[in-house]
Amino acid sequence: MIVVPVYNQMIVPYADMYFQTDEFRQLAGKSYAIGEKVVFLILREDQKKAEWNDDSFYPIGVSGVVREINQAGYVAIKTMNRVNIDMVGVNPDRTIELTISRRLDEQDLDETESYQKLQALKQEVIDVSSGYQWGDWMKQFVEQIQSIGSLAAALSRWMRLTNEEKYSILTEDSRAKRTEKMERELYEFLEIAKVTGAANASRQKEYQDMYRESAIKKQMEYLQKELDDMHPENVTDVQKFAQKIQDSGMNDTAKKEAEKVLNRLKQEGQQSAETGMLYDYLDFLTGLSWKKEEAARIDLAEAKQILDEDHYGLKKVKKRILEQIAVMNLKKQQQGSILLFVGAPGTGKTSIGKSIARALGREYIRVSLGGVRDEADIRGHRRTYIGAMPGRIMDGIKKSGVSNPVMVLDEVDKLGASYNGDPSSALLEVLDPEQNNTFTDHYMNVPYDLSDVMFICTANSTDTIPAPLLNRMEVIQFTGYTPIEKLQIAKEHLLPKSREAMGIPEEKLVVGEDTLKTIISEYTMEAGVRGLRKRMDALCRSAAVKIASGEENVYTITPDMIRDELDMRPVHHESVLKDQKPGVVTGLAWTQVGGEILYIETLLTKGSGKLIITGQLGDVMKESAQIAVSLVKSLYPDQAELFEKNDLHIHVPEGAVPKDGPSAGITLTTAIASLVTGRPVDSTIAMTGEISLRGAVTAIGGLPEKLMAAQRAGVTKVFIPNENIDDLKDVAEEVRAALEIIPVTRAEDVLHSTGIMDGPFLEKVV
């Protein structure tokens, strides 16, 4: 008798079972022959032979007999009855001894009905397997099966039943119930097989369709390429964009986004509402320069020559630009610090950006930020909005056609803020070299490297620029031009350009130096040269009429002709007063169009000691006036009754013009002291500086512009704060030569020097 332990296999009585020859020999543990008796033991767990023990087997088994040993490598076993395992023992050599007894079945099976059910099941199995390559073999095999038990045993290895569930069928004593259970499990298995087969067939069809589609596309691409080579003018937009994406050199993120949008463009029809938006996006993205430019070496001498050709003066600015170029050469990088040019209008802040681009051999682009109030103007609009556009930064990059242009951001001090966001905050990333290498425009929605762009910003004043933004830039002050510099600029740049713009040959129009000096001194009122350029244009237009009409062959403009030619009255400049009166002192002020002198006028009237301030002064100047009054009272305690019985009126002429700033303190103090003492101050003496209650004269700003205004007005002596001595190096040599500049530390120094207060004063002339 052969003992055969099996695991996770359905063993049922009255069935034909088949095993591979090698498998059965391994299970039996010894050789066997046809007709030899077999007892199948059911293992409780999947154990190796070395792990078997007396409790490793279920208490019910099946007897059988070896019916056939097939030459094809199969052993056929005919199972007989169920048996009870009364005793089982595992020997040290792993052989098994057992005692068995027959287990009786309830003979309640309807053979006719069972046969009919078997035929139906066999047909189901044949139908399910017909779609597979082994369907014919399965049909032949199934047709030989004579019982539901044989069919269940044959298919049990593929059923989703546990070892316990398979054994539970064997424990059923009723043949009818046992057969019913096997029938139910077979139908469930066949339904699962049907669904799996359908899914596999569907998947197979999808694979076939996919392979077919891929093959067709490749064939179409090949044929399209042949057509494109024959007729290049007929290449479709999709093909153009696909080629541009491949050739652009864009980063992986941008390439992935571009390909995704291109696929959408392929799927959308020509009449789709989104086609235009997708086209515009791809056109913008592929139109950008994504490739990093090599850092080219710049000839410093040539760069200096270009800057000198385009701009007269501006020595400090040119020196700083050449320093930046030298650093870029040494570090082999495309940009250095972010430069902020600050100065009055017309001083050349924007135009020098174009000269820098020419000196560097790069493209130039200007972005005007004046009046921008929407963050989207910097970062762009999201593409979900109708009419979405890229921001001004990326639009400028696109127009330049390169990744390293010189970009001038004009008028950053005139950025606004609204409910749409703060554009100055959006500029923080753009102007930060540590962040702008991954700048993401909302319209593009992919990062772009701005680290090679040389940004230059311009502003008239730093007062309105937020501190975080100002901190990212290096401020370079553009001081106003002196009359001598304006004369050279007019002769070398403005007049030749105006003549060329009006089509006047050089020899046809003569404008002498005296005429230019008169225009500069009497018909312009600015720190820059924008107004002077307009006057040159006006002269050339007037001359063009005379020359074109044949009235004059060579037209010469003399100083006495200027008023008629320009059709305007001379500009009124404040000049020193001819008469001197106590309580009136000349002060110096800075404006956005340069420096200007102003007069502080004071007057005592009968009253109760009130302080009256007029002239549309700001809060800072009002506080300076109050400090000056208190300081004069402390310096002249014997005049206390004068202040108590009179009202003090302080006025700064031109009341329609707002005035503010911390620089009029010493002028206010001197004017009040002059009024109190009755001693006038020479009108050719001007002063600037803030004052404190302890009498200290503190530093001010805009000194170069103020001193130029003093020289223009006829002032001969100027008092400045001692702390501003270092600023004198920014003042033109001709201005310093024309003025006696005296630094002071205390109010008493000024009062002694002007003769208002008795006592010696040692002048320190700079």
Image (cartoon, grey):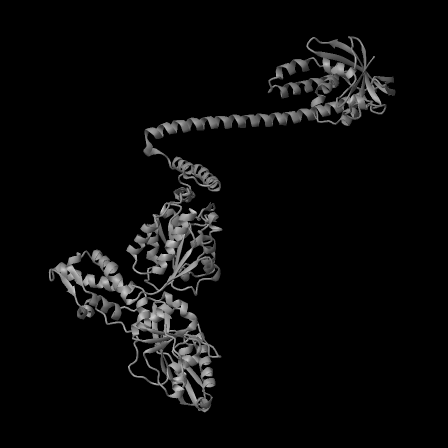
Measured as percent of width and height from the top left, residue 412 is found at: 41, 59
Q: Nearer the viewer, residue 49 or 222?
A: 49
Quadrant hosting residue 538 = bottom left
Of residues 722 and 568, the one drawn nearer to the viewer in this rendering = 722
Residue 168, by quadrant, is top right
Q: Position of residue 610 (x, y in %)?
A: 45, 86
Image height of 39 relative to 250, above or below: above
x 80%, y 23%: residue: 43
In the image shown, does 360 or 204 lie closer to the viewer?
Answer: 360
Does residue 298 appear in this view?
A: yes
> Residue sitting at 50 percent across and 28 percent down?
210
Up the image or down, 125 lies above or below 567; here it is above
Q: Quadrant of the C terminus?
A: bottom left
Above or below, 53 relative to 726 = above
Asked whether, in this view, residue 543 is left or right of residue 312, the answer is left
State which quadrant residue 127 falls in: top right
Foreground: 414 or 359? 359
Image location of residue 634, percent across then percent down: 47, 85
Question: Which quadrant is home to the N terminus?
Answer: top right
Q: Is residue 665 left or right of residue 547?
A: right
Asked if residue 420 can be seen in this view, the reply is: no
Q: Position of residue 60 (x, y in %)?
A: 83, 22
Q: Is residue 511 above or below residue 440?
A: below
Q: Is residue 713 left or right of residue 25?
A: left
Total tally of numbered discs in the picture: 0
Taking the spot 77% from the left edge, 13% from the top edge, the residue there is 78
